[in-house]
Amino acid sequence: MVTETIRYARPFRAELRYVNGIPTTTPHRWATGTDTWKEAGDLRTGDSVLDAMLRPIAVTIATATSLEPVYNLHVKGAHNFFVTDGGAFNYLVHNGGK
């Protein structure tokens, strides 16, 4: 359950990437296997991340070319949650310390 959403006033560019069209900061971790996580900044086009059914889905990576607002979610419990690409897939991500 999301307990708080923080919108940062300063937009980011240098640390913002798009993973299958989803904007994310480079340290944000994505599930790449069972108990395996990779920071968005380390993902490359062709790598796989896990969807909600824990299936590997190939990703396309793009670097932000415009300034975007950045949000941080505080999530109760394990800090794992799903983000959506607005279409067919939800992806398992982690919002917390290593």
Image: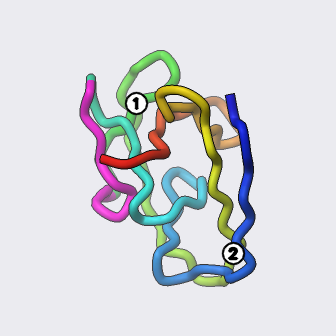
Which residue is denoted by mark 2 in the rendering? 68
Segment colored magenta: 35-44
Q: Is residue 6 left or right of residue 19?
A: right
Q: Which of pointers 2 and 1 lies earlier in the amino acid sequence? A: 1
* Residue 38 among magenta residues: yes
Residue 48: percent from left, percent from top: 33, 39
Residue 41: percent from left, percent from top: 35, 64
Query: Are the residues flagged by discs 2 and 1 in contact, CB closer than 8 Å?
Result: no
Residue placed at 27% from the left, 23% from the top?
34
Residue placed at 69% from the left, 75% from the top?
68
- Say which element carries label 1: strand
Within 10 angstroms of label 2, few (less than 14), some, or many (20 or more) residues? some
How far is mark 2 from mark 1, CA to CA?
25 Å
Badge number at residue 50: 1
Question: Residue most toward the top?
Answer: 53
Q: Is residue 84 above or below residue 25?
A: above
Residue placed at 25% from the left, 34% from the top?
36
- Say which element carries label 2: strand
Within 10 angstroms of label 1, few (less than 14), some, or many (20 or more) residues? many
